Image (spheres, coloured by chain):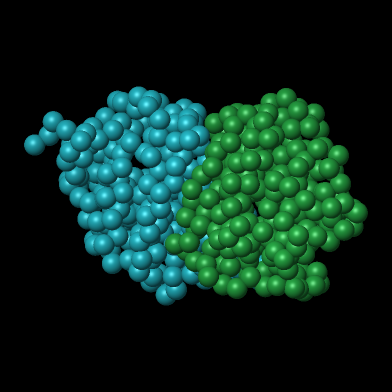
Chain colours: A green, B cyan
C-alpha cells in the first residue's frame, strides 16, 4: 500500500484510530483527519484528537458536531452505567450496551462526503473485528457492504472510481496494533480509550476499553503512558 | 403495504417527501419525520417541513443541524449559480451540479440510527429515479445497497431484523406523484421545491426543480398553489 494522494482518516482520539492515522501517513497518504463531537460523555476524546492530529501534521483536521442524543439509546450518549471489570469473554456476548446506533455508518457517510470533495479514493477507519466483535458495524462484512454502497453513492462511483474503506487493524490483536504503532513512533500518551474517565481525564482502568488496552500493553511488554485513577 | 408500527420519514419540505409522508401515514405507519438543516441556501425548506409535519400530525418531528459546508462542492451548499431554463433532456446529462456529496447516504444513516432507537423496521425516502436520474444516490441500485448495508449495520440486523428502505415514488412521474398526493389530501401550498427562491419564499419558476414541478401540475391539469416570482 503506497500512495501519495489525499485520504480521509476517521480519528476518535483513541488508540486504534491514532495507529490507523500513523499507518495511513506511513503509506504516503496526505491524511485528512475527521473527528466527531457527538454528545459522548468522554468529550475529552475530541481534545485528544486535536493534539494527535497536530502532532501527526495532518493536511487538515475537521471536527464536526453531530447530535446523536436526540435519538437516545446508548451508554456513550445517554446516562447508562458503563460496565466495569468484565473478562474478555464477557465482552464478546451480543451487542455491547455501549454500542451507538448506526454510529460508524454516520461517520463513514461524512467521510465519504469529504472524500468525494477531495477526490480521495481512500477512507481509513480503525475498526477491529477481534476486540469489538459485538459491534455490528465493526465486522468485515459490514465494511464490505459500505464499500459497495460507496461505489454507488457518489459522483466518483458513477464515473467508475470507487472508494476503498481501508481497515488496516481489522484482524489485529490489541498487542499487534500497539507494536505497529510504537514502530511508527505513535505517542500513545496522547490517546484516550476509557469509557468513563474522571474530570481530570484519568482513565478508570476497569471498563472494557481500559481492560483491552491494558492487556495489549502487557502483552507487548511496554508501559502504557496514560494516567489511570489511583495510580501514581 | 399495511402497518401500524413506527417509521422514519425523511422530510425535506419538498413536493416528493411530503407526498411520501402522506403515503406512509395512509399505510398506517406512525410517522417520525426527520429534516436536516445543512447549510443549504434554501433554508426556508426547513420552515416548510415544520408546517407540513404539524399539519400531518406526525408522531414526532426532529430537525437536525448538520454542516456539509465544511466539505464544499455543491450548488445547494456553496455559492455556485443554479442553472435555469433547462429542458428536461438537459437535466438528465451526468451528475447535476446541484448534487450534494453523499447527501442521501448521510440522511439515511441518521434515519437508520433513529429507526434502531425506535425499533422501526421502515424508513421512507422520496427519491425518484425518473426526474432525478442524474443523482447517483437516487438510483434503485443505490437504495438496494443501502438496505443491504442496514441489515449489517445495526443491532436489529445482527438479530435478524433488517430495515426496509421504502421508496414509493421511485418510478413515478411527477404527475403521478402529484395525483396520488392530491388523492391523499396533501396541501401542496405548504411545500417548496425551488433551488433559488427569493427572500419572500417565492419560487423562481425556472430552475430544474421548478420546471419539473410546473410540468407535473400542468400534466395533471391542477393548479400549483405556491407563489412564483412575477406571478400574481
Q: Residue at x 28, y 33 (%)?
A: B196
List x then y, in percent, for residue A227. 72, 56
List x then y, in percent, for residue A92. 76, 69
User: Would residue B157 be visible to someone looking at this image?
Assistant: no
Q: Residue at x 86, y 39 (%)?
A: A183
List x then y, in percent, for residue A67. 47, 55
Which image quarter: residue A129? bottom right
**Viewer-proximal residue, B206 or B197?**
B197
**Viewer-proximal residue, A34 or A111?**
A34
**Viewer-proximal residue, B56 or A34?**
A34
User: Would residue B124 be visible to someone looking at this image?
Assistant: yes
Q: Residue at x 67, y 31 (%)?
A: A57
Q: Is residue A71 left or right of residue B214?
A: right
Which image quarter: residue A86? bottom right
Q: In which quadrant is the C terminus of chain A drawn?
A: bottom right
Q: In which quadrant is the N terminus of chain A drawn?
A: top right
Q: Is residue A163 above or below residue A135?
A: above
Q: Residue at x 77, y 38 (%)?
A: A23
Q: Is residue B58 above or below residue B71?
A: below
List x then y, in percent, for residue B215. 27, 38
Outermost residue, left direction?
B232
* Number of numbered discs overlaid on the protein picture: 0
Amino acid at each position: 500500500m503506497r500512495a501519495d494522494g489525499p485520504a480521509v482518516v476517521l480519528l476518535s482520539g483513541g488508540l486504534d484510530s491514532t495507529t490507523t492515522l500513523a499507518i495511513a501517513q506511513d503509506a504516503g497518504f496526505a491524511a485528512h483527519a475527521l473527528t466527531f463531537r457527538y454528545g459522548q460523555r468522554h468529550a475529552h476524546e475530541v481534545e485528544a484528537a486535536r493534539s494527535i492530529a497536530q502532532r501527526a501534521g495532518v493536511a487538515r483536521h475537521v471536527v464536526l458536531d453531530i447530535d446523536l442524543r436526540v435519538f437516545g439509546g446508548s451508554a456513550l450518549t445517554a446516562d447508562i452505567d458503563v460496565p466495569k471489570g468484565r473478562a474478555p469473554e464477557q465482552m464478546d456476548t451480543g451487542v455491547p450496551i455501549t454500542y451507538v446506533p448506526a454510529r460508524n455508518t454516520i461517520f463513514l457517510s461524512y467521510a465519504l462526503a469529504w472524500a468525494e470533495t477531495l477526490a480521495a479514493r481512500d477512507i481509513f477507519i480503525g475498526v477491529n473485528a477481534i476486540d469489538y466483535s459485538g459491534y455490528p458495524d465493526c465486522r468485515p462484512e459490514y465494511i464490505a457492504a459500505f464499500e459497495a454502497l460507496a461505489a454507488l453513492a457518489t459522483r466518483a462511483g458513477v464515473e467508475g472510481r470507487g472508494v476503498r474503506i481501508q481497515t488496516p487493524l481489522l484482524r489485529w490483536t490489541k498487542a499487534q496494533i500497539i507494536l505497529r504503532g510504537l514502530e511508527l513512533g505513535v505517542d500513545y500518551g496522547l490517546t484516550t480509550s476509557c469509557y468513563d474517565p474522571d474530570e481530570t481525564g484519568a482513565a478508570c482502568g476497569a471498563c472494557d476499553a481500559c481492560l483491552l488496552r491494558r492487556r495489549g500493553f502487557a502483552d507487548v511488554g511496554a508501559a502504557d503512558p496514560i494516567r489511570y485513577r489511583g495510580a501514581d
